[in-house]
Image (cartoon, rainbow, N blue to C red):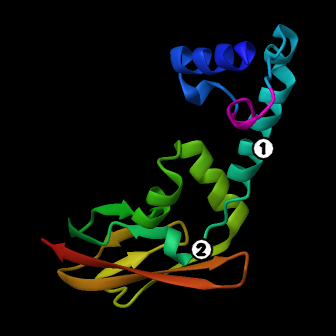
Amino acid sequence: MRKKLLVLGLAAIVGASSIPAGYMLSKAPVVASAEENDDADSWEDEDEDEDEAEDSRELTKGYVVASPAKKTIKVGKSFYIDLYPSDEFDSEYGDLPDEEWDELIEENIDSVTFRSTKSSVASVNSKGKVKGKKKGSATIKTTVTFRDGSEGIYKTKVYVTR
């Protein structure tokens, strides 16, 4: 009984979150040896499991947005349309460094194509570079084909001024 109280007292001092659940629920007194607590391999295994879970993320059309959604440029000027994580993606996975986002794009997207509804007003090349040609407006449709075969179509409204 004294050992059980010692473990419970230790949990109160250290904080219950740092004592494994089995210590608190056991009917018999449980005391871990120093060797058991210093076993770094068990912590490393948990980190590897987390890394594998992160690597299993799959992009779908709900997780991607083409940006900007609208843009005003002058004749002769240009900008790029790029793919970014959606708010839905951020709420589920949090912010990712650019390198990790680029890896997800590479691993989960088969192709990205761009098409202007009025190429005489705003043209777009295969890399997403939009150039203003003459005054007016056009919509650039970005079609993303995902590895699972689904497609996402995103629109960027372009206003060209003089």
Percent coordinates x, y for residue 124 in the rendering: 43, 75
Q: Which residue lies most toward the top here? A: 34
Q: Distance between the residues labelled 2 and 1?
A: 23 Å
Q: Which residue is drawn at 77% across and 28% down?
A: 43
Percent coordinates x, y for residue 155 in the rendering: 38, 81
**Which of the numbered marks, if any, corresponds to residue 49?**
1
Q: Which residue lies most toward the left here? A: 162
Q: Which residue is drawn at 81% across and 17% down?
A: 32
**Which of the numbered marks, if any, corresponds to residue 60?**
2
In magenta stretch: residue 36? no
Closer to the camera in the image, 36 or 25: 25
For discs 2 and 1, the disc positioned in front in the rendered view: 1
The answer to which quarter of the image holds residue 140 is bottom left
User: Callout 2: helix, strand or loop?
Assistant: loop
Observer able to see residue 29: yes
Looking at the figure, which quarter contains the C terminus?
A: bottom left
Amino acid identity at mark 2: Thr
Looking at the figure, which quarter contains the N terminus?
A: top right
